[in-house]
Image (cartoon, rainbow, N blue to C red):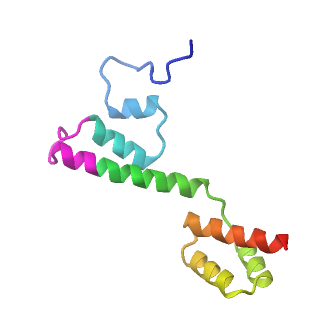
C-alpha cells in the first residue's frame, strides 16, 4: 500500500491555514491565497462564500500563470542580440520587439526560442 499523500503530522492539535500550507509545502503565493479562501469560504469576515470561491478561482488562474512563468526558459540579452542578427524577417522582428517590451511573458519567450531554433536548423 502506498503512503497517503494527504496525511501530515502537525505540530499541535490546534492548527491554522498557515500550518496546513507549511505541512503541504505550498510555496506559490497565489495557490496559498486560494487555499486560504477555500478552507473557510464566507467565514473570514466581509465576504460571502460565493465571493470567496470566485476569488479563489482567480487566484488559481494566477497561480498557474506564475508556475508557467517560472517554468519558461528565459533569453539573455546576448541571445536576443544574436537572434536579431541571424533572423531578418518581419515576423521574427515583431516577436523580438514584443518580447523585449515584456521580458517576463513566458509565451513570447517560448515563441522567440522556437523561431531561433527553427532558423538555426536551416
Left or right of 9, for residue 41 = left
Name the residue: 79% across, 75% down: 119
Secondary structure character of the magenta stretch overall: loop
Classify 87 as above or below 105: below
Residue 76 seen in render: no
Q: Nearer the viewer, residue 75 or 10?
A: 75
Classify 78 as above or below 94: above
- The image quadrant that residue 74 belongs to is bottom right
- The image quadrant that residue 23 belongs to is top left
Residue 46 seen in render: yes
Residue 34: x and y, percent? Answer: 35, 44
Q: Is residue 105 magenta?
A: no
Residue 113: x and y, percent? Answer: 70, 68
Residue 2: x and y, percent? Answer: 56, 16
Classify 2 as above or below 33: above
Left or right of 112, for residue 122 = right
Q: Residue furthest front?
A: 122
Left or right of 89, for residue 43 = left
Classify 48 as above or below 61: above
Q: Residue furthest right?
A: 122
Left or right of 122, for residue 67 = left
Q: Is residue 53 magenta?
A: yes
Split into 4 quadrants, where in the image is the C terminus?
A: bottom right
Name the residue: 21% across, 49% down: 51
Q: Residue furthest top?
A: 1
- The image quadrant that residue 42 belongs to is top left
Name the residue: 64% across, 69% down: 111
Q: Nearer the viewer, residue 11 or 80?
A: 80
* Bounds of the magenta segment: 40-54
Residue 63: x and y, percent? Answer: 44, 51
Amino acid at each position: 500500500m502506498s503512503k497517503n499523500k494527504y496525511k501530515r503530522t502537525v505540530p499541535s492539535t490546534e492548527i491554522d491555514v498557515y500550518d496546513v500550507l507549511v505541512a503541504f509545502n505550498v510555496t506559490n503565493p497565489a495557490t496559498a491565497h486560494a487555499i486560504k479562501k477555500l478552507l473557510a469560504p464566507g467565514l473570514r469576515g466581509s465576504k460571502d462564500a460565493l465571493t470567496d470561491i470566485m476569488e479563489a478561482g482567480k487566484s488559481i488562474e494566477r497561480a498557474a500563470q506564475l508556475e508557467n512563468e517560472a517554468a519558461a526558459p528565459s533569453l539573455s540579452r546576448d541571445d536576443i542580440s544574436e537572434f536579431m542578427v541571424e533572423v531578418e524577417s518581419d515576423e521574427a522582428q515583431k516577436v523580438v520587439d514584443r518580447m523585449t517590451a515584456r521580458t517576463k511573458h513566458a509565451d513570447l519567450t517560448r515563441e522567440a526560442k522556437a523561431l531561433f531554433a527553427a532558423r538555426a536548423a536551416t
